[in-house]
Amino acid sequence: MDDLDIGTAPRFVRVRGADLPVGVTSPWTKYDLAEGAFWPAPADGSSGIQRGFLDLRGVGLLDWAGATTPRWALSAVDVDGAVRALRTEARALDADGERRPALPGLRTPGLMLIRPDRQSDFTARAGIAAGRAGASLANAEFTAEDLVLGYRVDIRIGDPLVFHPLCAREATYTVEDSDGRPITLGTAAQWEEGHIAPYAAVKTPDGRLHADEVVVRWDGWGTATPVVDLLGDAPGPVPGPAPALPYVFRWEFTPPDRTLPRLRFGTRYQMRIRIADLTGGGPSLDDTRDDTTYATKTVLYTRSEPIQPPRLSPDGPFLAGSALDRMVIRSDTAMNAQQFHLANPQYPPVERRTLHPPAATFALAEQHGVFDPPRNQDPDPQFMERTWAWAQRALRADAESDPADALPDPATSGISAHIPAEAGGLTTPITERTAWESWPSGAPRHIELSDQLSASPPIWLDWNGDKLEIRLAKGEETVLELSSTVADKFIAHFAVNSWLKQPEGVPLPVDEWQVAVLNGRHPLLSPVRRVHLVHAVRRPLAPLVWQLPRENVDRAVNDTNAVLRPVFASTGLNTDSTGRLEISAAWREWSNDGTADRTVPYLFGETIARGDPPRLTIRHEFGDTKHRRVTYTLKAISRFRAYFDEDDPDEAFQLITPQPAVNIPSSAPPPALTLLSTTPSFRVQHQTTSNRIERSRASRRLRVEFASPWYETGEGERLAVLVAADGATPGIPVTRLGRDPLFASPPLAPTAAKSWFTGFSEAPLTSPDLGPSVWIVPYAVTREGDRWYADIEIDPPSTAPSYGPFVRLALARFQPETVRTLSPLSPVVVSDPVRLLPDRRLVVERTGPDLRLSLHGPGPHPPNRLEAVLEEAHTPSGTPLSGAIDLVDLSVPPAADIPSWRPLPSAALASDQPETPATLRMPAGSRPLRLRVREVERLGAPPTSTAPAELRDRTVFVDVVPLPADWRPG
């Protein structure tokens, strides 16, 4: 040793055998001397090999938030598994946008030593090997890295300064003789130390080598011995496909009795790595049992796995829409769940599930220490038997899927049942908890979902003994979050306990921030199992009612479509029970050729979310700019169709509600009006009693005729008469008046008042584009042949008793339902002056053979002349009277062979006072009689006129009154 301690570093040494039969020269070995020992020296500081140890000074638990990557780190979390789970969750979220994101649960595979960026070690070693390939080793320089056979792992527990070996084992090697009998090589059960290969890799199917960054993983068992098969049902180790040996070689490795340290949650550990060189040498355990020089920091080993939520099992078959994690009861609008069950026995009124404690694996239970005897005591046979029974339950849980008698997770104390607040649901969350029976009992608990008959509260939750009772009102749908509460004594076993921080600025006791953890409401420690709870109603609970004021109907100029934005009150759409809304439309189409009913069976549909009613935007295409009154019918479809049998008719899940008709305004201005004529018009009424006949003629009306087409702007198109407001002088043409200059009548205002017009189709109104100075009086129109007409009724007040005034109408096509940026009127057309004839009422009264006649109504000064004559029906001799007679025979003598009415000269009168009754006697006879009456203006004919009197006179009123047969004396 003294001879080796020469010069300064680096130092190299090699061995030569000159006196041997064959000359031997070893490669150079870089070395170091320390404390009287010879150690291979590292090439540099990158590998961390120092004096036979892996230099792990300062290595602690992996800092996930660290800014730099450490050379080595300890971890109790399955990093690769967490990354794979995150990738899987990301893919699931990408495939299902409505999926609720969830952090995958972490796993504690044991205490691991990690070499971040281990790939660089493999690359460096591969480069060195490639550089030496085929070259002579005579002058090669080996370093400590070249001489590593493996790593030997030691563990220190707690405070005692003692390291325990994990690679120690008792080994027995045998071969078989020619008779198949085993021959032990050396000593049986010989103590030795194995090692962990530092550069082990797995060859993947594509031929690539894959190596984990986990160099060492201690899961509580030795790292150089196979795990004992406690159930005895697993096959033993099988030699790998190495070259066949000329003999059968076997080995058996077992851990030395009572040498394995216990891996337990909540315990502090320190790890060190001794280097095994190519000859199997290296620092011995006995010489270094208390040496912590190159060991890691002491770290707390904790559980990363969350406590799983309670397990569910069904209590019967699943009906439509039900599943293990979806509980459903059913009813209808007029029936509760029990009544619905009586009417439909296939649907039970309650739904049940069974809850089981979460299961623990054997490793998890063991690392919680539940199989350990009390401290400083040796286990007695009863304890061994009891814990072996527990262990078997855990081992079976590892080997089977959801066994009935699994060992419960010892860290859980009970169940937390929580219904969160959510939009359209609870405003305040509900949480109820209960405890399991004492561990390791697996006694179950139960869930029962039933009908909440009261609407307040809509959701009810409570534990009643071992039963969680949940009641939902009709249409309610919520999520029950089941999680496990944590036993107080195990809270320190969990990694999350050290991650939690007391909320800033909240003056709480130090331990109060753990309340959420202990109560099972921390997602990293107690993830929830969500059970969907549904009270399905067959039909929506409320009829649909929307508000659609005119300002919510959008239509731009010349648009052929309309955009509707209806608004629902909270009572107008029950979103709890309505899953989809569909809209149809119906209206009457008005055109020049008549009317036709139109329907759109499906105009719009939208899926309805719970919560506030949606704000819909509905585009309705019509294909033209016309105004229509559209009835929209809303169909509410139950959101719970999937929870009932497929054979149930779809109509049973629908509620159809027509809405009030909606005006879709015309988006184009009314086209110009083509006026054909304006003439007087009459309306006649008859009233007859036994001795009195009264015939009235309403004459103060004008018939306006105009050309086709009509309804160019759609339904409701009217003929508008434009009238000036009282005292106004509009800047556009309006209806004007003037008295007849031939007669002495009181003067009239130059414009007609709105109040003079009657018989209109809608109340007179003003228009924003014309202002308040002009009134629009609308009249409905009627088709006659190839033209249209409207009767304009004008009734001047008694304060303006002008006789036969002339009227000049201002007319336009009018569409009151026109978009507000357009005028509802076409260009104004002015008619020719037309005389407004006076109203007349003719009264004929019988007194015996006498008739008393009077004609009433406004007249001129001087009054008009009233003329009346009786006419008798005649037919050719021998021909009976049948059918109507249209001719009046005025010839002298009368024609005998023509059916006609003949005036009776002896029964005629003329009066200059028409309103004063005049008498006319009926002659005796049996032939039918009629009375012909004429009112004539006393203007006089031109002196040179030779026309008959009926043509020369200006006749104001003519009527023919058939007389009852029983009026004529026999």
Image: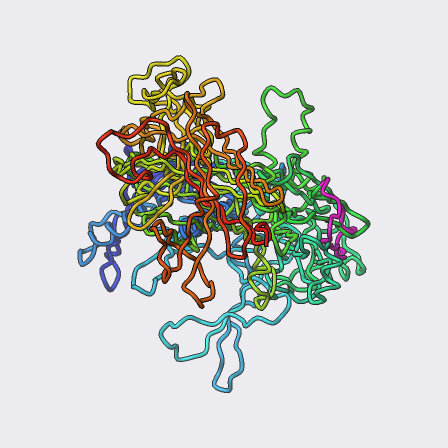
Dividing the picture into quarters, in which one does residue 490 lie?
Answer: top right
Q: Report x, y in % for residue 296.
A: 49, 38
For the C terminus, give its image quadrant. Answer: bottom right
Q: Is residue 246 visible?
A: yes
Q: Residue furthest left?
A: 135
Residue 281 on the magenta segment? no
Q: Report x, y in % for residue 340.
A: 71, 60
Seen in the picture, residue 712 relative to 794 is either above or below; the reply is: below
Seen in the picture, residue 564 relative to 256 is either above or below; the reply is: above
Nearer to me, 407 or 87 = 87
Q: Report x, y in % for residue 511.
A: 68, 29
What main secondary structure does the magenta stretch of the protein show? loop
Q: Residue furthest bottom?
A: 179
Q: Report x, y in % for residue 169.
A: 55, 59
The magenta span reads 434-457
Residue 450 on the magenta segment? yes
